[in-house]
């Protein structure tokens, strides 16, 4: 079972990933957590390059190649191996993030990303939780941390990324669960675990 979490900065993804991981482990599941870009040695190096603030502008096409290099390497080294062992894999972001950030946020062609994704022979998550918050709320929640290259983007960028995520959610209703991330942590946790267990049971039938 491959589950991904998506959302703009400060949406509470990390907290819910942590809670889902512990709930599943308590129920006896083997769980592997991933983050994108990152997780592998090569991926973490790409993450550093990707997020570092420099005085050079990085074109969204260059961003996409960095992200897809990390993603393909993760797929080969960790993702498929864990799925083959029957583990539940929880990814903190996956390919929807590239559509939302690079395509909707920065204007890169969706066909281009669709092509790279298909030719790289990558998987699609079985279930995706999209944590929806406004761009204003996001900026407010991250205002007290030191911002990386992406977090430093203006409010308008995050508005476009959010619109992208909302469209991805409405175009993929069987896979993507859109959650109002303003709800309480416990309430969100309950819905996420319920939906995950339902999906796990459905795949076992
Ligand atoms: P985070 O996962 O710690 O929030 O940091 C990852 C950053 O990278 C975040 O700003 C979103 C961005 N990102 C993209 O722009 N495209 C992608 O495909 C992925 C996976 C992340």
Image: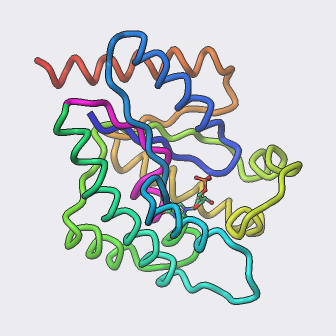
Location of the N terminus by quadrant is top left
- Decide if residue 27 is on the left or right side of residue 44: left
Where is 200 relative to 146, above or below? above
* Residue at left offset 33%, top offset 46%: 172
- Decide if residue 134 is on the left or right side of residue 97: right
Estimate the x, y position of residue 31 in percent, counting from the top left: 37, 29
Estimate the x, y position of residue 143 in percent, counting from the top left: 86, 51
Residue 142 inside the magenta-drawn segment: no
* Residue at left offset 45%, top offset 69%: 67
Residue 99 visible in image = no
Q: Which residues are magenta?
A: 86-99
Q: Quadrant of residue 147?
A: bottom right
Residue 25 visible in image = yes
* Residue at left offset 32%, top offset 63%: 73
Image quarter where ligand 1 lies: bottom right
Specify the farthest residue to the front: 41
Estimate the x, y position of residue 186 in percent, counting from the top left: 62, 15
Q: Quadrant of residue 25?
A: top left
Q: Say which of 154 and 5 sits in front.
A: 5
Estimate the x, y position of residue 151 in percent, counting from the top left: 72, 62
Q: Quadrant of residue 99?
A: bottom left
- Decide if residue 29 is on the left or right side of residue 185: left
């Amino acid at each position: 079972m491959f589950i991904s979490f998506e959302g703009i900065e400060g949406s509470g993804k990390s907290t819910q990933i942590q809670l889902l991981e512990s709930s599943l482990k308590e129920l006896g599941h083997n769980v592997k957590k991933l983050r994108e870009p990152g997780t592998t040695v090569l991926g973490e190096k790409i993450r550093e390059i990707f997020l570092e603030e420099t005085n050079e502008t990085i074109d969204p096409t260059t961003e996409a190649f960095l992200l897809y290099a990390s993603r393909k390497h993760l797929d080969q080294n960790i993702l498929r191996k864990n799925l083959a062992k029957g583990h539940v894999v929880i990814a903190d972001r996956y390919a929807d993030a590239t559509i939302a950030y690079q395509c909707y946020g920065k204007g890169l062609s969706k066909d281009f990303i669709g092509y790279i994704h298909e030719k790289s022979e990558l998987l699609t998550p079985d279930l995706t939780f999209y944590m929806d918050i406004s761009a204003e709320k996001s900026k407010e929640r991250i205002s007290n941390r030191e911002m990386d290259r992406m977090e430093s983007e203006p409010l308008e960028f995050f508005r476009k990324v959010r619109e992208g995520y909302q469209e991805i959610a409405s175009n993929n209703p069987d896979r993507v669960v859109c959650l109002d991330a303003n709800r309480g942590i416990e309430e969100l946790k309950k819905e996420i675990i319920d939906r995950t267990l339902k999906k796990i049971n459905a795949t076992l039938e």
